[in-house]
Image (spheres, rainbow, N blue to C red):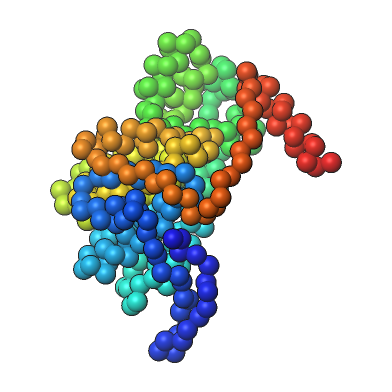
Amino acid sequence: CHLGPTSGVSATGGSIRSVNPPFSPDALQEAVLAHRGGALLVTGAAGTGKSSALRERFALLVEGGADPERVALVVGSRRARQTARDALIARLPSSLPSLNVLTFHGLGHLILRERFSALGYAEPPDVLSAADQFALVQDLLQGQDQADWPAYGHLLTLRGFADQIRQFLLRAQEARLAPEEIEASADARGLTGWRELARFYREYLDVLDADRVVDFAALIGRAEAAMSASKAPLLDHLLVDDYQDATFAQEALVTSLRVDDLVVAADPEAHVFSFQGTTAVPSLRFTEVFEGAAHVDLSVPHRAPQPVRTDAWSAAHTSEEHAAIARELRRLHV
């Protein structure tokens, strides 16, 4: 059922193409392929064929006459992007001018390239690399008056503090938190340091706007703003994989695209990237955000036909959990 490993190669017109096993959907996957518009949530455990069903749906849409430029598959990482592209190139019989298999940041790039004028920009904004963003944060911190930082002033020159501030700025934008909200939380809890962070956050956003640049988090936010300000949709069909690891900003971007055909796949139980600012909430509330959305729960295991044994334990407190993990790592190492 999966678009599995290459089983051979064949020469066609002087080029070599991979030969993949044909996709044979089970009954539940067939329901995903037969979806005829609107929003659809596809859930299922690992190995139930969520990614394969999305790739096959992409191929069927193109083969059915959909404009390839207006069909996009969004995946969770560069590695997943390459895997999906390779599978689709092998699956589709003819070459395409472009293949919109993207990460969320790639989708943001696409939107700003096409709709930058909706933001009042004369040209698409430059995107700061991680190194450039760190340099900007470090430079801004170096120029701060220590008297304005009663809680954190003694840390302003430290490289590690600058990196923590860089991460904070990304996480705050991904969570769609405004400086005013952080200030309100600071006042409610009596945390002076939070007010310092909120003030610096506002200054940082002002610098991005003045320089017409975006960091990786702001790229998503600006793309969402551009689509919200645009009257015409950019895409007709949008497929999103690994939606259990979306951010609130990415959820807002998906909503702003206003596509007639939206299919997302998620396994909320597999959400593991909270430390990078992602959350399972968008997948859990998908049918609420998109009223009338259908839901298909895949249950046929294709990766491991035999039942998988799972050993689990629970800890009463996070510290006990961390200690147990440390013991296990030491045991494995020894």
Q: Position of residue 279 (x, y in %)?
A: 44, 34
> In this rendering, would 240 be left or right of 323?
left
Q: Position of residue 228 (x, y in %)?
A: 22, 42
Q: Quarter of the image holding residue 62? A: bottom left
The residue most toward the bottom is 14
Compared to residue 311, the image places residue 77 above or below, namely: below
Whether residue 293 is visible here, answered yes or no, is: yes
Residue found at x 57% / y 17%: 151
> In this rendering, would 260 be left or right of 221?
left
Residue found at x 63% / y 19%: 317
Quadrant where the image shows the N terminus: bottom left
- Decide which of 233, 10 is in the foreground and name it: 10
Q: Position of residue 104 (x, y in %)?
A: 39, 50
Compared to residue 19, the image places residue 297 above or below, namely: above
- Decide which of 212, 52 is in the foreground and name it: 52
Residue found at x 74% / y 34%: 328
Quadrant where the image shows the C terminus: top right
Compared to residue 177, the image places residue 132 above or below, namely: below
The residue most toward the right is 334
Residue found at x 33% / y 32%: 285
